[in-house]
Structure formats: C-alpha cells, structure tokens
Amino acid sequence: MTTEISKENLREKLYRIIFGTDTPAGKRFDLILIVAILLSVTAVILDSIEAWQLRYAMHLFYIEWFFTLLFTLEFIARIYCSPNPKAYITSFYGIVDLLAILPTYISLFVPSASLLLVIRLLRVMRIFRVLKLLQYSGEANALLRSLLMARRKIFIFLFFVLILVTIFGSLMYIIEGPIYGFTSIPRSIYWAIVTVTTVGYGDITPHTIFGQAIAALAMLTGYAIIAVPTGIISAELISEMQRERTVIRCSNCERFGHEADAEYCRFCGTELKYQRSNPIVDPASNSTSDNKAL
C-alpha cells in the first residue's frame, strides 16, 4: 500500500515538473530541455560541415548519443507520468518527441557503406528536434490551434488555387507549346505555380502576345489571392485569443478579457493569482490554459 502511494506521488511530482509551468522545478526543467534542444540541433548542423565532421567526428558522435539518451529518458518519463499515455504518444508533440530520438537508433541497423543517402537522411531528420521548442510556447500552441480550426478553409483555398494553375498551365501549353519550353501540361502547371506565387524563376517564359497576356493575368491573380490565407489564419488567431481571454475571470469585478499571463485585473486592479490556479488535466487535452500543451 505504501509503495503504491509513493509511486502515485512520484508520478504526480513528475507530471508537475514535466507538464507543468507553475513551479520553479518545472521552469528549470523547461529551460534545461530548451538548451539541450538548441545544442543538439547545433551539433547536427556542424556534423553536416565536412571540415567539422572530419576533425571532430568522434566528439560529435558522443554528443549526439548523449542528447539521444537524454531525450529518450524524457520521452519515457512523459509516458510514465502521463494520465493518458496513448493520447500523448499519438499526439503531435508525442510524435515529435519520438522523431527526436528514432533516427539515431535506426542508424545502428543501417549499413553506412551501401546506404549513405539513408544515413544522411537520418542525420538531417534529427533537425526536427527544433519542433520540440513549440511545446514551450503558449503562443505557438495558440497558432497551431488556429491553423487546425482553419484547416477546411485553407484546404478549399488551396484546391481553388490548384484549379487556377491547372487552367493557366493548360492554356500556356496550348498557346506557347514545346517550342518555347512548355513541353507538357505538368511543366506548364509548374510555370503557372511559380508565376502565381510571384516567384518567377525565369527558366520558362512566354514569347507570344497571348501567352504574355495569360502570364500577366496569372501574376495579377497571384497578387489578388496572396492575402486570402493570411486573412483566414488571422481571423482564427483573433478568435483563439478571444477564447483564451475568457478563461480568467476577476473575483472582484467578475469580468473576463485578461491575458493568460496577467497578474492583475485590467479593470479593477485585483490580483488574479488565485483565479489562475486551474487543476491539472490530461496533457492530451487543452481544457486549461495554465498547463503546457503536452
């Protein structure tokens, strides 16, 4: 009985340190992990430089395994103390945490002599550890939720753009033809995408009057639609910020509209310290604003 109670206390303490942000230990844990992530990503970048790789190969190898073991222990600890381990493992941050350690272990079973490209891919995949930094920023979580809420509108917008570039590409294939570089409809669609996005590589250019007219129309269309996804995401982000501001209510004037990190009421000046203490919840959910998302 005593052993079970001690295990529960250990899990609760680990949960508060790993998933919580309202304790000094939790803040120190976050700071250490952020520094470790930045150092590990720096090591991966240096490993891609030939001079560094030849001179400090063993040092970089030991550094990589040190961070891999560190992140492995963190991943195991998160699974151990999470109220819902399955929800954490299948969540966005759970997958990111797994990808942060998986390539190093896979490289043990891949022969470097015959599959150098795979080894290089595994090394570069370790750069995705930088995504682990997102879970330590409330603003990043708000942005991710805004993108999730706007996913249908963004999909419809991208589908509409795909239709437009297909039409423009097909017209250019008919008007310009292979003689001017538009050798196929897919290559013409590539030109349309480059033109609509206002990149304009210049590797394929229209030469006829009708082709240049279509190109001008495509460029004007690109400028016209470039603000659409920005407006969609901005609207969802504003809605998300408004939802966050309705979480904290002042006990004195009973009004909402406070920032997540506000310490005093913006209307009457009452301290919000005790109104901001929310219970710990499952890390797979976002029902409270004071806990880190995963």
Image (spheres, rainbow, N blue to C red):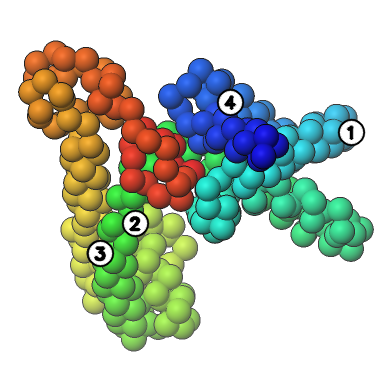
Residue 179 in percent (x, y) is at: 45, 80
Q: Which mark is residue 153?
A: 3
Circle 4 or circle 3, nearest the eye: 4
Q: Name the residue under label 2.
A: 148
Which residue, given by chain and number where applicable, does mark 1 sit on?
A: 58
Q: Which of marks 2 and 1 is in front?
A: 2
Asked if 41 appears above or below 240 in the picture, the reply is above
Residue at the image point whose x is 46% and y is 50% from the top: 284
Q: What element carries label 1?
A: helix
- Estimate how packed mark 3 is, as few (under 14), some (14 to 19) or many (20 or more) residues with alpha carbons within 10 Å: some
User: Label 4 amino acid?
Assistant: Phe
Quarter of the rendering containing residue 160: bottom left
Identify residue type, mark 1.
Answer: Met
In this rendering, the label closer to the viewer, 2 or 3 = 2
If you read the primary sequence from the N terminus, does the residue marked by circle 2 or circle 1 appear first? 1
Q: Which mark is residue 29?
A: 4
Q: Residue at x 55, y 21 (%)?
A: 25
Q: What element carries label 4?
A: helix
- Tell me which label, 2 or 3, sits earlier in the chain: 2
Can you say which quadrant of the picture contains the N terminus? top right
**Under tag 3, what secondary structure?**
helix
Residue at the spot 45% in from the left edge and 79% down from the top edge = 186
Classify residue 187 as left or right of residue 236: right
